[in-house]
Amino acid sequence: MNRLIPIAFAILLSACQNVPLTGRSQIQLISPGQEAAMGLSAYESILKKEKISTDPANNELVARVGGRIAAATGRTDFKWEFKVIEDDKQINAFCLPGGKVAVYTGLFPVSRDEAGLAAVIGHEVAHAIARHGGERLSQEIIVAGATVAAAASTKDPKKRDLYAGLLGAGAAVGFLLPYSRLHESEADRMGLIYMAKAGYDPRAAADLWRRMAEAGKGKSKPPEILSTHPADQTRIHQIEQWLPEALKYYQPRPRPMP
């Protein structure tokens, strides 16, 4: 067992990468190709189950805003694709690895305008650029390995179950959930920069998340320490702190001539 520790350390060290824009170090045990393939598979599965919008105005809006955000990332290796899903109850959007973006129609009343939509798409695209999906899967692999190792350290079945249970619960609250909240905050920060680079005023993001918080009022939410996302006020406060950084990238696009 002791001989495996240096090997495991060497593997983890070789898997270290840095997130674009933030420079944060992360562990990636999944290759970009594997992650993109999983993203495409998930995307195709979702589109088969959902009703795809044929509304020309909504599709043109998402393609236009999404295209500008995608261009701002500089990731020409991504196979960008934009869809609108008919579901007025879903105030949501997503971007899967490889650049597969979808916006639910329930988001439009809350996003309101192009800048609001850019804040959401910028956030979702940032998840894919930062490879948060691959990082999360890598973390789960590490936790699973640690759980197996802890269980194997004793022959007593009761202790084995106890060790596995304690490690699993501790990893969730002390490791996986904090990283999930970190991913959300990092996507907010990166998304501000991408929307600014795309010519959208990043100050619109704070107003967007205030509207999102208002739309979520009355819904049961866990305390922040047990949540995958930062609390609404935490998120808005962080965005306001990051605005000076994002505004350095902001150049308003000239309006088209009438």
Image: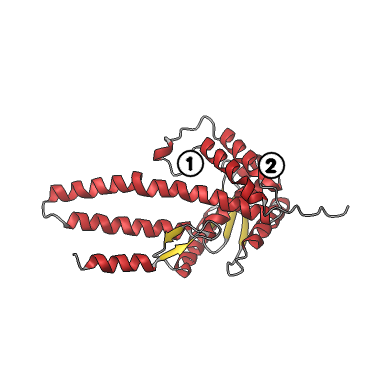
For the question of whether residue 84 can be seen, the reply is no
Give the farthest residue toward the top.
Answer: 218
Q: Residue, x 37% and y 57% (percent of image)?
A: 139
Work out which quarter of the rendered image holds the N terminus and state it. bottom left
Residue 245 in the image: state x and y as whole percent. 62, 50
Give the image location of residue 38, x and y in percent: 46, 63
Distance in Å between CA atoms under marks 1 and 2: 23 Å
Q: Write the residue at 52% across / 51% down.
A: 186
Q: Residues within 10 Å of mark 1 (few under 14, many from 20)?
A: many
Task: Please state if 144 lies on the left or on the right of 23 as rendered.
Answer: left
- The residue carrying mark 1 is 230
Tag 1–tag 2 contact (CB < 8 Å): no
Q: Position of residue 109 (x, y in %)?
A: 66, 40
Whichever of callouts 1 and 2 sits on the residue coming sooner in the sequence is 2
Q: Position of residue 57 (x, y in %)?
A: 73, 51
Would you call the spot at circle 2 few (<14 residues within 10 Å), some (14-19), or many (20 or more)? few
Q: Circle 1 — which element?
A: loop
Q: Amino acid at mark 2?
A: Arg
Of all residues, the one furthest to the right in this rendering is 258
Of badges 1 and 2, the one in the foreground is 1
Residue 251 or residue 245, whichever sits in front:
245
The reply to whether residue 248 is in sight is yes
- Under mark 1, the amino acid is Pro
Q: Compare residues 11 and 172 and report the one nearer the observer.
A: 11
Q: Which residue shows up at 73% across the image and 54% down it? A: 251
Q: Secondary structure at mark 2?
A: loop
Label number found at residue 112: 2
- Residue 155's place in the image compared with 233, above or below, is below
**Left-right relation of 227 to 252:** left
